Amino acid sequence: MRIHLIGVAGTGMGAFAGLLKQAGYDVGGSDENVYPPMSDKLSEWGITAKTPYAAANLEPAPDLVVVGNVVKQDNPEAVAVRERGLAHASFPETLGKLFLEERHSVVVAGTHGKTTTSTLIAHVLMKTKRDPGFLVGGIPLAADGGSSESFRLGAPGKRSPFVVEGDEYDTAYFDKGPKFLHYRPRALLCTSLEYDHADIYPSVDAIIARFAELLSLVPADGHIVLCAEERNLLKARAQALVKARVTTYGAGGSYDAHDVVEDERGLRFVVSFGAHTAGVVSAMGGDEGEINLPLSGRHNLLNALGAYAVLAGLGLTHDEIALGFESFPGVKRRMELRGEADGCTVVDDFAHHPTAVRTTLEGAKKRFVGRPLWALFEPRSATSCRKVFQDDYARAFDAADRVLLAPPGRQLDPSVALDVPKLAADVGVRGRSATACASLDELLRHVIKEAPRGAVLMCMSNGGFGGIHDKLLEALSERARSRA
């Protein structure tokens, strides 16, 4: 079967192309631009990527065309697909039909934590030799500091786990429903539910309704795991036609943590079990045992508890889960150390929603104890560039000692756009020195002129941030040389 992917150079579509190739399909694709690192990965996997988009890329005719969600209706290949009557489907629909129908689908959904938590679950399943399949949205870091693939075919069979992120974003130009409705979850973890994706959802209630649909999809012999601290998830549960067993975690949930210690090594805590699995509180339960996890922040403590509940539901013992957690190397762009120069540490993080910015900085403050914490933030997503979170962002930087704000990555009408100078002023009112920079070069100048040795430079963006990480390391190295 020959499969052509339109938009193959995107992170998710590229990984899916690799998964299809691993499964034995004849895979090719196209994109407007194909550049490293995805161009190198596609070549490594033996997948040809044509550029730019053109109807001729569909010759000879493939058996199936997979259309990425960034592809618009007037894309020349999308037009040719319709005109020629070629079989086509979205990435989520194809993933569901070709891989998840015949496996035990483990779906991780939520506004925050999907990539870290799904990768953590997959890592533990690998460590305990469960031979899982997975497709995650980030690149897992290998124990030696290198990186591994974000996909794996795993063993076939109804009992074989396949871990996938469940995104609430829309599926394709011809399918405006959320991606996660195609994933047929048998185990479903929902980490959080806040307002996001302002370009497609008019309100948080609209997102809650979609999560209620997802919860209703889990069969009676399935397992739902919900964060008890997320009231919007509880609203979704109340709206859903829930058939499956439900386990909660966090404060007031079935699984919780106590004796929590957080320092430069990460998180240490004891897992307890003893509340409710179906809305009924039980007096039974107790401590499951101690966990060591090399991640930071309360958000990752909750992510770990959710992962623990899913893995326990799949039959893993505490010792197996603890072994996997302790050896988890993390994920690229999730508090990833990019390097050190002139005594400063450059860290890369994907945080862009105000809640993620706040919890990431709070975790960094505990991980890098006693060091000046600088927050370098680029609003880039469709939601972060809008003023919908203007006041929330002002509170999100409280754990930082210095805040530098880059220009927004999208140009929007001033009536709806985030007011970055106002944000800097509002952060300043809360006692933090903040500057709205007119350019990336200006931001870099502030760092080189003002950042003391020992500073932690937390770079937060859901985009490339203009290659700021390497630029910082180069400029700081030059600063050190000029002082020598």
Image (cartoon, rainbow, N blue to C red):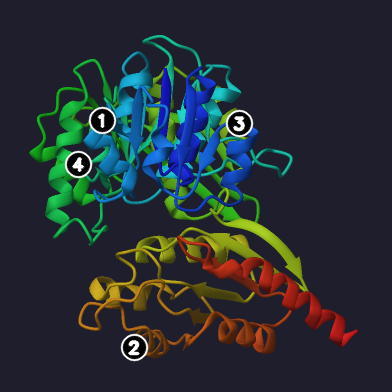
Amino acid at pointer 3? Trp
Residue sitting at 57 percent across and 83 percent down? 443
Q: Earlier in the sequence, mark 1 or mark 2?
A: 1
- Element marked by disc 1: helix
Mark 1 crowdedness (10 Å alpha carbons): few <14, some 14-19, many ≥20? many
Where residue 201 appears, x then y in whole percent? 18, 56
Q: Is residue 158 visible?
A: yes
Amino acid at pointer 4? Phe
Q: Earlier in the sequence, mark 1 or mark 3?
A: 3
Do residues under tags 1 and 2 come within 8 Å of each other at their CB atoms?
no
Give above or below for 460 relative to 118. Answer: below
Amino acid at pointer 1? His
Residue sitting at 28 percent across and 31 percent down? 89
Q: Earlier in the sequence, mark 2 or mark 4?
A: 4
Calculate the distance from the C-alpha at mark 3 to the C-alpha at mark 2: 47 Å
Q: Earlier in the sequence, mark 4 or mark 1?
A: 4
